Image: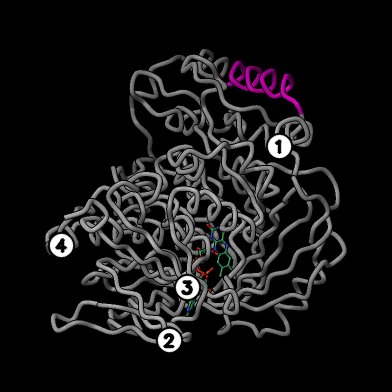
Amino acid sequence: MAEAEKRKRVLVVGGGTAGWMTAAGLASLLGQHLDITLVESEAIGIVGVGEATLPHLRHFNRTIGLDEMDVMAATRATVKLGIEFVNWGRVGDRYIHPFGDYGVASDGVGFHHFWRRGMEHAGDIGHYSLPVAMAAAGKFAPPSDDPRSIRSSYRWAYQFDATTYAPYLRRHAEARGVRRIEGEVIRAVRDEMGDVAAIHLRSGEEIQADLFVDCSGFRGLLIEDCLHTGYEDWTHWLPCDRAVAAPCRHAGPLLPYTRATARDAGWQWRIPLQHRTGNGYVYSSAHTDDDTAHEQLTQSLEGELLADPRVLRFVTGKRRQLWNRNVVAVGLAGGFLEPLESTSIYLIQQGITYLVEMLSAGPTPDVVRNEYNRMMDLEFERIRDFLVLHYHATERDDTEFWNDMRTLRIPTSLREKMDLFRERGRVQAYDHGLFLEASWLAVYLGQRVVPQNYDQRADEPPQGALHQQFDQMKTFIAQAVGNMPTHQAWIDQNCPAIVENAA
Ligand SMILES: Cc1cc2nc3c(=O)[nH]c(=O)nc-3n(C[C@H](O)[C@H](O)[C@H](O)COP(=O)(O)OP(=O)(O)OC[C@H]3O[C@@H](n4cnc5c(N)ncnc54)[C@H](O)[C@@H]3O)c2cc1C
């Protein structure tokens, strides 16, 4: 048999961020084993939002061979050191969830236990985080590789123009042999075993494949319309189901972080890019209406509106199986957890990573599919719990929405995590899944969930020495930040946008 005939035929349906990440990822990492085609419809278009990312995406870009500064220039990206949460615990509160650690652990005891012991002297735990101080000062320099340096204590991500990343990846994928077909999928047909055999385009063309990756967006053309996989709806835990989004002109310095401000019936994002600021109000349609949300968003913009606001609707949750028969759903086709912690592109990346690890030349046995689904379920569930924490850990009772969230019956898995932290200051550990200890600490402490007890070993240093350590740490952080360029200067020097002033 000729080499080309033995290669597994993969058809990616959809050319948004999920589709082109999948095509580029598979072509770069498994290109010699696969024959990859992507079909997309320009007439249908892409969702076109999704501007804040997580540090993991930098790893994905590196792994598939992209030049980071080139990606940033092409996507008009800025640096993201974390998310600032405003008005969440109480109106007037603010804290940053940074991509980095707090303080330094000592003899295996986490810094936050020492902080808890001396919190009256120590003040806000954010004072002991370098990325928090950098964000507040609008400064940026890349982290150091030297683990002894305080500059090794953080990571960073991008804030980018969501409409430019997929076209960028397309060039990369096509250069690695991915075949693109323009056309609208009108039907999928199944074989006698029930697997998907082929799709049909409006043009009359039929495309067959061995494996289908459904990246068709919320609708889930193959995973739902064809295979009827079913959807786990998590709206009862995360009731926000709409967003109104609009870009505006910049005002003020270029900030290296995303802002999430709690509003009457949800929250509002502010994402600074090189050429504009992205904004959106994510809200619960059971607690407010589109007109009110639209008005509240447009009235709060910092600069001139650059395009008409548009409303997006979604149902928070996930498919019952992300890999069903010979269809893997990646991106919005697989599920959506609202964008509060910028997790959607991360979930795309994880879907691709597990697929690369588990794909083989022959048919996929159930045991492999089950493992893929188990891993993806863990990812979704852990993110879900982390998101619910933001809404539930509040003292706000000023609107019906916040009252409902404060008194919500939360998932048992989250209840256990919160009880453990309140009791012992311990963050429940897990190996797989996003958001490890520092992230949980940021939200717990930022939203006034303070533990009653701490690790007894934190009582060892004399009080004077402990206070001195706190003060020294703050001095080191201030010095490190003082030596860094502004975020704007770093961008101008390393990755200025290729296309300026585009709306
Ligand atoms: C309000 C909101 C804010 C968000 N913010 C963030 C964020 O800050 N960070 C983050 O990581 N994520 C965010 N996301 C999620 C992010 O937008 C998506 O994960 C990402 O864009 C991937 O989308 P997708 O490729 O799955 O779907 P889409 O962009 O919808 O792409 C679907 C593709 O399928 C094609 N298609 C559909 N039907 C057919 C058909 N019949 N025939 C042929 N082609 C078809 C379309 O043309 C398109 O190419 C946000 C989402 C929303 C709704």
Instruction: Give the CA separation, mark 4 to mark 1.
Output: 44 Å
Relative placement, left or right, of 216 versus 284 is left
Question: Residue at image x 37%, y 53%?
Answer: 418
Q: Which residue is mark 3?
A: 217
Q: CA distance from mark 1 to mark 3?
A: 30 Å
Residue plotted at (30% across, 58% down): 376
C-alpha gap between disc 2 and disc 4: 28 Å
Against 139, residue 3 (above or below) is: below
Label 4 sits on what residue type? Pro
Report the span colored magenta.
470-485
Residue 242's label in the rendered image is none
- Binning the other alpha carbons within 10 Å of mark 4 as few (below 14), some (14 to 19) or many (20 upward) gives few
Residue wearing tag 2: 204
Is tag 1's residue or tag 2's residue first in the polypeptide sequence? 2
Q: Earlier in the sequence, mark 1 or mark 3?
A: 3
Q: In the structure shown, which secondary structural element does the residue marked by tag 1 occupy? A: loop
Q: Quadrant of the C terminus?
A: bottom right
Q: How many marks?
A: 4
- The alpha-carbon separation of the residues under discs 4 and 3 comes to 26 Å
Residue indicated by mark 1? 495
The reply to whether the magenta stretch includes residue 257 is no
For marks 4 and 3, give the one nearer the viewer.
4
Answer few, some or many: residues within 10 Å of disc 1's Cα (few below 14, many 20 plus, some between 14 and 19): many
Residue in view at x 41 percent, y 81 percent: 205
Give the foreground label among 1 and 2: 2
Q: Are marks 2 and 4 in contact (CB under 8 Å)?
A: no
Does residue 460 appear anywhere in the picture?
yes
